[in-house]
């Protein structure tokens, strides 16, 4: 059986990836990106010293292998109730557009994006509308969103 190839962006210590691996032993992670050095150390301890690319804004999509599913827990601080709520006015908020750039270039079959509950209502819902609009323009017309409790 052919492996399901994933990439793990804004990987932290690998929690989203771990969830996918828990439900299937048919997962192969072919690319990881995380910039926090302590998270990278933990990630590599959890995943046999795999190569972890740093700042995704500096990664050319040509080095990212073809994959089936893109996983990304992109930074939540710009959208969080506890943060400054600057949204796309915060450089961390614009990191979503790096996800978009990879989706456009690599065209995986699916993606999972994770963020905070407040993303749904940030800027009176306009932020989420922009994200969904960009995902649809990238070719993903069946976008589903849910708040998990």
Image (cartoon, rainbow, N blue to C red):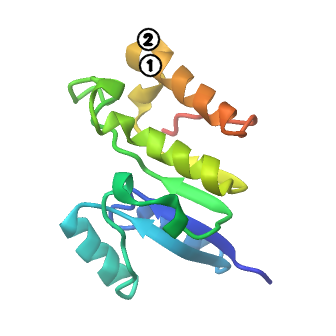
Q: Is residue 126 left or right of residue 46?
A: right
Give the left or right position of residue 62, taking residue 15 as reference: right
Indicate the secondary structure of the residue bearing disc 1.
loop
Q: Which residue is mark 1?
A: 121
> Residue 91's x, y, as percent?
28, 36
Which of the pair 60/133 is nearer the observer? Answer: 60
* Viewer-side residue, 91 vs 84: 91
Q: Is residue 20 visible?
A: no
Residue at 27% over, 61% down? 35
> How many labels, in total?
2
- Which residue sits at x=34%, y=43%? 75
Q: Extreme right residue here? A: 1
x 54%, y 74%: residue? 29
Q: Is residue 134 visible?
A: yes
* Image marks 1 and 2: residues in contact by CB distance under 8 Å: yes
What residue is disc 2 on? Answer: 124
């Amino acid at each position: 059986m052919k492996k399901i190839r994933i990439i793990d962006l804004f990987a932290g210590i690998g929690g989203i990836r771990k969830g996918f691996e828990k439900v299937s032993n048919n997962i192969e992670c072919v690319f990881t990106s995380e910039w926090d050095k302590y998270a990278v150390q933990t990630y590599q301890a959890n995943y046999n010293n795999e190569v972890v690319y740093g700042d995704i804004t500096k990664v050319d999509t040509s080095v990212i292998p073809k994959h089936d599913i893109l996983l990304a827990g992109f930074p939540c601080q710009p959208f969080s109730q506890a943060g400054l709520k600057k949204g796309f006015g915060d450089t961390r908020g614009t990191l979503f557009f790096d996800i978009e750039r990879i989706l456009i270039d690599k065209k995986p079959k699916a993606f999972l994006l994770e963020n905070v509950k407040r993303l749904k209502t940030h800027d009176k819902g306009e932020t989420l509308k922009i994200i969904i609009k960009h995902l649809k323009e990238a070719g993903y017309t069946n976008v589903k969103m849910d708040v998990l409790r």
